[in-house]
Image (tube, rainbow, N blue to C red):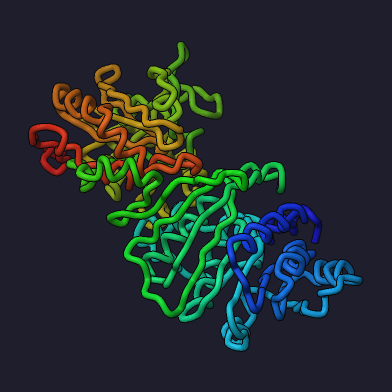
Amino acid sequence: MTVARQKVEFGDFQTPDQLACRVCERLAQSGITPDVIIEPTCGSGSFVLAACHAFPHTQQVLGFDINATHLERLRSRLVGIASSGRVQTVAADFFAHDWESQIQRVPGELLVLGNLPWVTSSTQGVIKGENLPQKSNFLGFSGLDAVTGKANFDISEWMMLEVMRWFRGRTGTLAMLAKTSVARKIIQHAERQRYSVTDAYTVGIDAKKDFGASVDACLLVITFRGDVPPPEYLDYRVYASFQDLSGRHVGHRSNLGVSDLQSFERFSSLAGTSPQKWRSGIKHDASSVMELVQTSRGWENGFGEIVDVEQEFVYPLMKGSEVGSGKGWRGKHVIVTQTVVGQPTGSIRERAPKTWAYLCRYADLLAARKSTIYAKNPQFSIFGVGNYTFLPWKIAICGLYKSFRFRLLGPVEGRPLMFDDTAYFVSFACPHEAEQVFNILTSEPALGFLSSLTFWDEKRPIKAGILNALDWSRLTEPFLITAGNHKPL
């Protein structure tokens, strides 16, 4: 196996010795005194060596790894170290090892530390990697979420959830380097599953410097006590770096992740359910075919071809990036084959024969779209459409941008404006109603509430779940803004 493939398949980012020492020193200074230390994916041993130095009274240090070369390197590094007699190295596959029996044999207080693989399940699928847990929908997603992006997970997330089970009914600490987004999910899981946690915090690290990875990452520390009841709320501290001594308080309220508890408490009266559900834009996964630009020669697709299609199924399109950057409509269009998800598409043949012929020309390409959501739906299906899609006035926002920049947008060329699936929107029949809601959403209380729920380091920081948690009707006189009352087209 090449070094490059090993890094991709196994998420094999070896921890620099200096960072491992800094982590172990932080843990020791906080008063952690483990009887046994386990590193389940020890690699060439940076954490094992650092732990030997930081915890001189620990009885045993166990290092496990699937890679025999890494273990041989670790053994050579242990030669001449006085405390190396406490260290035991074990060749083991994390996903096949009998951890339950292993942990039952561990006496006293346990510290599990290290750096689990930084790789996602979808990446494993692309490279046909085998470093995966047994396939299961372990996060419990249903419907569309189970077969799209939400079902993609970091391998370290699954592994840390497994490690947390080792602390049921016992005292100890989990200390892992992880993507910041994964660390938040682990803490949220600990709260939901009622673990007996007495302390939790994260410390930001420079992943670019330490691993050459352009990702937000941190040290995650969770302390468990088997003899205390679980907390009602698992609030935790977020330190920007090892030099940050104050941190900020983060937690969960009403099943929502809260990035700023102080701000959330100030605006908590706005928490509820949005009067109208925020929707994502159209998903088609075939921009070269489905997206067109009007030129002097006619419609041009993404392949640079001039195509002849009827106007009936062609609508103006604004990308999420254009919504987020404040740009106006830039002449893009999209073919909208359905008005609701799952609608038969055969009627296009009679209503717009040239459009049907165009789609048929690319039938193989459209049938080969990777997402399984297309497999059991009519030919040329799209997603993210409903009655709400075709209302003329919309308030939109891009989920990828690092600020709440709402846009009030009306029809273009007499037709309702469409968005791609990186944008979220609510829609209205009446421009006055749309303007009212826009003024509410851009008010200081609304923005304060939404910001208190947003973690800006995430790839898509603005999510439908955050937008739908704001009950904007509490900021004005009640009025009807529900998509369910719009007349179907």
- Residue 156, image x, y percentages: 58, 62
Q: Residue at (35%, 41%) from the top-left corner?
A: 452
- In this rendered view, identify the residue nearer to me: 14 or 327: 14
Q: Quadrant of residue 255?
A: bottom left
Q: Is residue 382 visible?
A: no
- Residue 195, image x, y percentages: 42, 71
Q: Quadrant of the N terminus?
A: bottom right
Q: Residue at (66%, 64%) from the top-left corner?
A: 114
In the rendered image, the vertical position of residue 32 relative to residue 272, given as above or below: below
- In this rendered view, identify the residue nearer to me: 11 or 189: 189
In the rendered image, the vertical position of residue 47 relative to residue 290, given as above or below: below
In the rendered image, the vertical position of residue 21 relative to residue 89, given as above or below: above
Please state if 433 lies on the left or on the right of 186 as rendered. left
- Residue 109, image x, y percentages: 58, 78
Q: Residue at (55%, 29%) from the top-left corner?
A: 303
Q: Quadrant of residue 187?
A: bottom left
